[in-house]
Image (spheres, grey):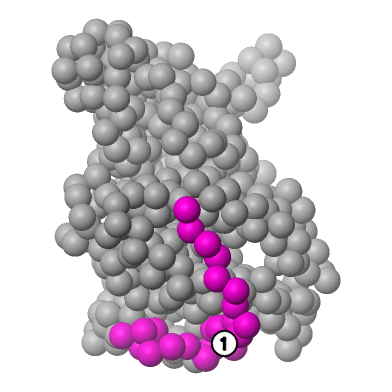
Amino acid sequence: MGAEDTAVRAILEIADDCLILGHRLSEWCGHAPMLEEELALANMGLDLLGEARALYAHAGELEGKGRSEDDLAFLRREREYCNCLLVERENRDFAHTMLRQLYFAAFMQPLWQAIATTSSDETLRGIAAKADKEMAYHLRHAGEWVIRMGDGTEESAARMADAVTELHRYTGELFMASPARAAAVASGLLPDPETLRAAWDQTIATVFRAARLAAPEIRTWQKGGRDGIHGEDMGHLLAELQFMQRAYPGQTW
Amino acid sequence: MSAPAQTSGKPSDTVADFELARALETASAVPDPEVPCVTVADLGILRSVSRDETGGIVVRLTPTYSGCPAVIAIEMAVQTALLEAGIDARIERVITPAWTTDWISDEGREKLRAYGIAPPVGSSGGRRAFFSEDTIACPRCGSTHTTKVSEFGSTACKAHYRCDDCAEPFDYFKCI
């Protein structure tokens, strides 16, 4: 891969994270436990889709092969998506969804902040400055729910503890740099994910302490998403995400 | 950054550009599709109206939130208003610097309040503590005895509040 291809790939990793998690949140429409959360989940999903759109448009332009944001979002095969496994995990219950959101936002907020201030790419800095503000309230909203549920009733605490057991093993992949990411770090395009670990650890420790949750010791981190190796959940997600474009190619609003 | 839109050049040292002035006036008056009591200039999303190197008029707009579904509607509304005024302009979307509620003009804040939407309080900041709350005054009775019902509302930019004195539910334009 040339320098530009790796830059495109590195941006797509972030774009795919945002698209897939945004889609997961959209699946809650009509199913949230209460109206206020219905609005919250849709709002946060929309932020993530907006961030993904901006990143896809930019990646498509850098790539220079005429691929639009829609082509990148809807017309790739499963193996070509390079999102981390955490974001594709199914929604399960509200505890799983909010914990997944906390894990992701606690990583993304310092990431956007670092991109906004240090990236060599002006467009990326602009996208990041806006996304940073959005991620700050995703983080607060998700963190407050994890605390409420973890330190809540017997039922909510048990569900939150289950979510931690299930999802914590997916968080290691956030900090692993793919070859494309390593090249982007070297060129000054993106920060090294390892440098974000201290901020993430601190956020999670603060929330878990208030939520009376314990982080499990993980021996083997789940990984593979950055190489396009996804779990079973991903196929089901893409079937819905891509249906319209696959059934009616070129369909536009 | 308080001025929502600037034209290039000072009136004193340039020949008056009536078309450009009219374009600025026309674009500034376009209402926001979601919050029609305020204009795109009041909100600070109209960044500039100027001429490019070929002499064409360029209108720069910036989105409020990354996923704001009104972005295209706003761009089309501005383009349409200009066309109806007989002005051919190019609309450009700018993302840097990122929009902030700090750019909402004092006039815009007052229009929001009169419309029943509490304007953003304070200056946009970064991360806030978990469970931290701002004191928001009821746009109807002015009481600060209010309760947040939901941080998320009918559009990305608003939260739901309730006044505990006059019992009126109201929208709050979030500070970002």
Q: Is residue B123 above or below residue B97?
A: above
Which quarter shows the C terminus of chain A? bottom left
Classed neighbour count for the residue bearing mark 1: other residues with Cα under 10 Å, few (<14), some (14–19), many (≥20): some
Farthest-out residue, right: A186
Letter of the chain that mark 1 sits on in the rendering? A
Amino acid type of the residue that numbered disc 1 sits on in the rendered structure: Gly
Which residue: 38% across, 62% down?
Answer: A160
Can you say which quadrant of the picture contains the N terminus of chain A?
Answer: bottom right
Residues shaded magenta: A212-236
Residue A16 visible somewhere in the drawing: no
Question: Residue farthest to the front?
Answer: A154
**Does residue A63 belong to the magenta stretch?**
no
Query: Front-most of A79 and A108?
Result: A108
Nearer to me, A217 or A126: A217
What is the quadrant of residue B38 in the picture?
top left
Q: Secondary structure under badge 1? A: loop
Relative side of A40 to B166, left or right = right
Image quadrant in which you'd find residue A225: bottom right
Residue tagged by mark 1? Answer: A224
Residue A17 in the image, given as x and y percentages of width and height = 50, 70
Residue located 55% across and 30% down the image: B124
> Is residue A66 found left or right of B158 in the rendered image?
right
